[in-house]
Image: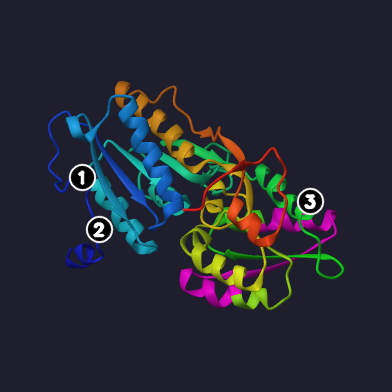
Amino acid sequence: MQKFLLIGFICLIGCNQKPSGTPVIGFVDAFQDSTIELAKNGFVDALKANGFDEKNGSVKIIYRNAQGNIPTITQIIQYYINEPVTLIAANSTLPTITAIQNTKTIPIFMMVAPTPALMNVNDANGESPHNLFGIGENLNYIDTSFLLIPQLIRPKTGQLRVGMIFNQSEPQSNEAIKRIEGLAGKNNITITALPVNNSADVQLITAALLSKNIDAFFANPDNTIFASFESIVKACKQARVPIFTSEAGLVARGALVAYGADIYQWGYQAGIQAAGYLKTRDRSALHWEMVKTRKKVYNPEVARYYNIVIPSNFEPINRK
């Protein structure tokens, strides 16, 4: 228990005593990150819009952040199960998978996570876990995002070269790499992809990637990239290599353009679904859904730095 406290967990309301009749949400973030935090904000705002607000005592949220530590994610989920909470809100892939592995009864509402099939959590009949709800995403949008690169970048010499890094332990990241390599082959693009084990590796691996004379960096949906994005931006800027991405939230943090999910709206959509469950406690009509809000965005400051003209159908987004 002492180790559990020293990790630095925080509770938004500061007390684990549950008022009688008040629903309790266990919200877990995989790590501290300004991009996935947008999903948490959207989730909480959706609850408030539907009558569940901590300020008036209509809901209680126990918040924990694993700070990128996988064993800690398991501790958090087990803690929620022992409470027990009314539902678990899982922000990103690893908390979602961990929750699925540890409970078959408590409803799980996922966000910033791929589909159950991409997470490899479906049963032999292709059915997703019966207690898994919330909002997932497939990888179809990555095609559109990746093919923005040949539209906006001219290769330095010969064939267009794109660099990527990926965490081998993240299912959606591995699937994205396979998809992009196939897409690149059809579009005369060379891919150089290097694996990372954790955030501590990102700076060194990014430097190794940039030494290979790439024309652009593609930031795929990978939690390790989310957690270390500022160091990637710094290195790419120094090397004058623009960053393309499929994640709209990364554009505000220094990527050039993206076509992808609005992370705030992703969390909001999950929050609406969770609020509906809290009102009825009926899960018979519930099922996980695909993310609804995607958009094309660009960073004007970054576009000016690289002297790149962005199509008029892209929405400008200010860097944070």
For discs 2 and 3, the disc positioned in front in the rendered view = 3
Residue 240 versus residue 81 in the image, above or below = below
Q: Which mark is residue 151?
A: 3
Q: Amino acid at mark 1?
A: Glu
In the foreground, 277 or 215: 215
Residue 100 visible to the viewer: no
Crowd around label 3: few <14 · some 14–19 · many ≥20 (10 Å)? few
| Residue 183 image point, x, y percent | 77, 53
The residue drawn where x is 45% and y is 40% is: 264
In the image, 318: left or right of 236? left
Q: Pointer 1: what residue?
A: 83
Rate crowding at label 2 as few (under 14), some (14 to 19) or many (20 or more) other CA atoms within 10 Å.
some
Q: Identify the residue at image location x=51%, y=53%.
A: 319
Q: Which residues are magenta?
A: 177-206
The answer for how far apart the CA atoms under marks 1 and 2 are is 16 Å
Residue named by callout 2: 9
Question: In the image, 6: left or right of 223?
Answer: left
Q: Earlier in the sequence, mark 3 or mark 1?
A: 1
**In the image, residue 288 lies in the stretch drawn in magenta:** no
Magenta stretch: dominant SS?
Answer: helix
Q: Residue at x 33, y 31 (%)?
A: 47
Residue type at numbered disc 2: Phe
Give coordinates of residue 95: x percent, y percent. 41, 51
SS label for mark 1: loop
Name the colour scheme. rainbow
